[in-house]
Image (cartoon, coloured by chain):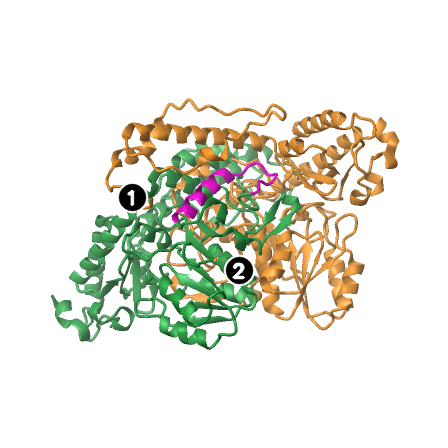
Chain colours: A orange, B green
Amino acid sequence: MVGSYSAGAGETAMAAWDDQLQLADVQAVLGDHDQETGVLVMPPGEEFAVEEPPVDEEAAAERQAEIAGLLSRFNQHLHDRTQHHLGYPYNLDFDFSLLSRFQSFCINNLGDPFIESNYGVHSRPLEVAVLDWFARLWDLNKDQYWGYITTCGTEGNLHGLLLGRELFPDGIMYASGESHYSVFKAARMYRVKCVKIDTLISGEMNCADFKSKLMQNTGSPAIVNVNIGTTVKGAIDDLDRIITTLEECGFADRFYIHCDGALAGLMMPFIKQAPKVTFNKPIGSVSVSGHKFMGCPVPCGVVITRREHVNVLSTNIEYLSSRDATIMGSRNGHAPIFLWYTLNKKGYRGIRKDVQRCLRNANYLVYRLKEVGISASLNPLSNTVLFERPKEETFVHKWQLACEGNIAHVVVMPNITIEKLDNFVEDLAAERAMWYQDEGCTPPCVAKDIGHENCLCGDHNKKARMS
Amino acid sequence: MVGSYSAGAGETAMAAWDDQLQLADVQAVLGDHDQETGVLVMPPGEEFAVEEPPVDEEAAAERQAEIAGLLSRFNQHLHDRTQHHLGYPYNLDFDFSLLSRFQSFCINNLGDPFIESNYGVHSRPLEVAVLDWFARLWDLNKDQYWGYITTCGTEGNLHGLLLGRELFPDGIMYASGESHYSVFKAARMYRVKCVKIDTLISGEMNCADFKSKLMQNTGSPAIVNVNIGTTVKGAIDDLDRIITTLEECGFADRFYIHCDGALAGLMMPFIKQAPKVTFNKPIGSVSVSGHKFMGCPVPCGVVITRREHVNVLSTNIEYLSSRDATIMGSRNGHAPIFLWYTLNKKGYRGIRKDVQRCLRNANYLVYRLKEVGISASLNPLSNTVLFERPKEETFVHKWQLACEGNIAHVVVMPNITIEKLDNFVEDLAAERAMWYQDEGCTPPCVAKDIGHENCLCGDHNKKARMS
């Protein structure tokens, strides 16, 4: 059918599209609510099928109204889903209305943040200001660091681990089994042998196992992924002990450490008792997500490394009048504006307040869950609350919980209020009473996931469960 | 300095930040204009340094006004740069004001577009609708294709070439020397041997050289990158001849072809005489950029492959309740909304009109350049006009031209009007008269870049240059 339309036909209708959509007095049918969960149902997929704009003017106007209606329903749906979100580490509380004017520009920070390309519609000065802030946070001077704003945490990990491989081409990668999936993807992409390290029940890397696996591979340098907050349990690998272990095993000058700080990388610096991620220690790179603790409409992240490392990676690209040291070439120039605005607005002080509130609220959630007899746990200094996986998928879906095996988690982000947590616990307790009302149907034991002391299953804490 | 602020101080000022910024009657000093180029100068980088919001209320209000002023100047600067842009293949002509409301959501299509994850704030139905449209454009049925909306053209190439490597782990990569830099980056990342093929003067792959290099490596399968529009010259590799060459050299069932259609991949289907990119031919994947011909505020792209290929890449990720078959894990959910809106608004008919206008205007530009004595050329079916590189970097910078060696290019995108081209040619002709006014200072010969017939240097066409 391609190219089968007569040129010029229906132009009027097309030209007037925007105006009419803006003005259309659309009586959008705002969709149905699911009977069981009360969640607003998105229009079915087929309704979104792309259609050729009709040539006939009346039909075109009708289609425009239909599009506007679809977008309104979609907007409502996203609003509803945002309100009912608990499971992923995204801070959904932001107001960037002042920045909406920038949506009319195609902002592309292509190439290196520190080398201006010929394309002028970019936000490098804001990007560099954000990078400076993060380099300072992790104790690297301006003239000693290199970094960029990435598309997401995965790109930060891909970049850090690629640096490690380029510095140690015959290196072996080490990562705990609870590392983010992007770490194992990197090993596969880069054709690097990857050794999986056992974890403690907290989710933290088991350094005894790390040691024994290092000793089996003393001939090859080590490229180590260190988790500053694992995806599922929010566990922090012990950076100091990992470094000591490497040194003890004779890897003194033959290792590269990448710290994956997706969520907690931006929380740790604001907690006095927390282990410190800093370039004063022998680490190679740190990455953190921008849409997680800070909050951002688009996924993004920051990766910071030592300036001398990045030279192994970069290639001059004359076409860009820049050099190519990033994973992606074209880079979203809006993300730096969002991050820049948030940092200026909140500052260290504002972020620290957010961190403190999240930790407080996470402890509150564990208390409330246990109070109603639900197994739950929380690593120290973490905002990721683990608990017994809800039996019904509709409930998981309604609250958008992330699950693995017998456990689910809620990440208590800055947008999660006490009120929302109360609603959630009440909803869960009420549903759960129905799931387990029959004799012989009991909640699962989660002792091996979160420890005996946190498990309130029949065997482990009959008393608490009955209270 | 981290954490050295007293908790709770300055809260009022912080809370009122947004309101005050919105309402502030900012008398923004809109920056100076460069004397030479007339271009608005962006505030210097230091002015954007992130600062901790002051505790003192008055100081905080002052800082807020300063921020608002900076953003206003930055907005003006981007506006100016957008108006003076000619060198990169970005369509800067779009109006997405109807979609601005979506900026208040953190939209993340994490994981696979076809498998719903538990995170509910996503735009998968729109993404799939866009993918369906592209699959249809390239002749793959709904049940036969897989694909996703990428962050940029680079991600599309990284994905396509990774599929090739996973299907043929001992394959050798082949790409013409004028391929996009991401292709060679992929080879390095993936640890695949890459053989560079010579090009014709048009920029197209030299199939004789391809053949001779294939014959030197008959023992290994071939992973071939085919350019549907090279970055610098807009040249189209001859897909049919490449396939025939592979078959003739005995690679019949041992090759994978990825088509890099960054810009022209979306133009070719709308030009009757153009070679056809289609999955009816034995190709493995096609990628195209979304911010190029279609226009989009954020860089993005589309990659489409055969469904059976993607299984070699995917890994189930329980945490996401999805599978991991993309390069990035978190994915910008706004990009699909922009693309969906544009496709519905323009349709095949609208895009074809854009293509026709661009080709017409590109021919007009070549005519105008030659008319004033400037060497220029244009590949058939291309909108990338090559010409003698302007002598002064300030001029290159002003019009944001992309340059390589002795040549520069203008990509005539849908937002480039005849009027803008006229202004450009007049500006260039006037400046050039000054650059070359002295005896002995002559424009460079560009015959080896764009052919004798297009070169108007002293040696090649004295007469034309003097006219």
Front in this rendered view, residue A274 or A422: A422
Image-based side of A353 in relation to A43, left or right: right
Residue at image coords 71%, 39%: A408
For residue B150, the mark is: none
Residue B198's image quarter?
A: bottom left
Quarter of the image that includes the C terminus of chain A: top right
Question: Which disc, if any, is residue B162?
Answer: 2
Compared to residue B101, the image places residue B276 above or below, namely below
Quadrant showing the N terminus of chain A? top left
Give the percent coordinates (x, y) of residue A91: 59, 39
The boundaries of the magenta stretch are: B115-137
The residue that appears at 35% across and 38% down in the rendered structure is: A52
Q: Which residue is mark 1?
A: A4
Q: Secondary structure at mark 1?
A: loop
Front-lying residue, A319 or B423: A319
Dot 2: chain letter: B
User: Is residue B456 positioned above or below A342 on the image?
Assistant: below
Which SS class for mark 2?
Answer: helix
Q: Amino acid at mark 1?
A: Ser
Q: Chain of mark 1?
A: A
Q: Give the x, y percent position of residue A60.
A: 32, 31
Q: Is residue A23 left or right of residue A269?
A: left
